[in-house]
Amino acid sequence: MLRFAQQHGVKPAAHAFATTPKTVRKWSRRWQAQGYAGLRELSRAPQHPRFRIAPAQRRRALQLKRQLPSWGAARLKRDFQLRLSEKALRRRWRQEGLLRRKRRKHRVKRDLRAVKAAWRWFEQIDLVP
């Protein structure tokens, strides 16, 4: 693509390779600055994420959950003025293995054997005309 762009121009190269002129210019700038190394795919992750959790905040949230395991995210956030969201708190606790899975109570379904045993023969048969 870059050779084609050098020979024929940016817009014809973009048309020939089904891309935009902006993309052709971007790749040619990378090629001029870094050579073959500049043509490698770069990470699209943010370079400086604004919402990264500070290590002090993370330690505080984990420490509080270890001290008060029965308290939930909303209560700890409210009572200890934590700056993290409830969702972020639960995510951190889950990653650290601090959240207990809620035990489900075994529920017995209604057993009709005793009721059916008390019936007389052919008592519950529906005869459709």
Image (cartoon, grey):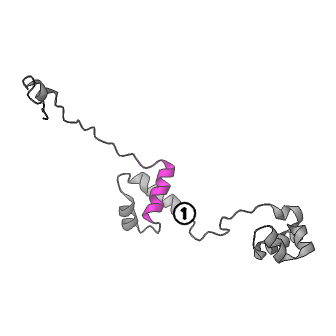
Q: Secondary structure at mark 1?
A: helix
* Residue 96 sits inside the magenta stretch: yes
| Image location (x, y in percent) of residue 115 | 11, 29
* Residue 109 sits inside the magenta stretch: no
Query: Residue furthest toward the top?
Result: 121
| Image location (x, y in percent) of residue 118 | 8, 25
Q: Is residue 67 above or below residue 51?
A: above
Q: Residue at x 40, y 46 (%)?
A: 100
Q: Residues within 10 Å of mark 1 (few under 14, many from 20)?
A: few
| Image location (x, y in percent) of residue 113 | 16, 27
Q: Picture quarter containing residue 1?
A: bottom right
In the picture, measured across the screen, residue 72 lies left or right of residue 48, that is: left
In the picture, measured across the screen, residue 105 lies left or right of residue 37, that is: left
Please provide the residue range marked out in magenta: 85-102
Q: Amino acid at mark 1?
A: Ala
Q: Picture quarter containing residue 46?
A: bottom right
Magenta stretch: dominant secondary structure = helix
**Closer-to-camera residue (7/71):** 7
In the picture, measured across the screen, residue 47 lies left or right of residue 64, that is: right
**Residue ID for mark 1:** 56
Q: Is residue 33 above or below residue 59?
A: below
In the picture, measured across the screen, residue 87 lies left or right of residue 12, that is: left
Which quarter of the rendering shows the C terminus? top left
Q: Residue at x 42, y 49 (%)?
A: 99
**Closer-to-camera residue (36/3):** 3
Q: Residue at x 52, y 60 (%)?
A: 58
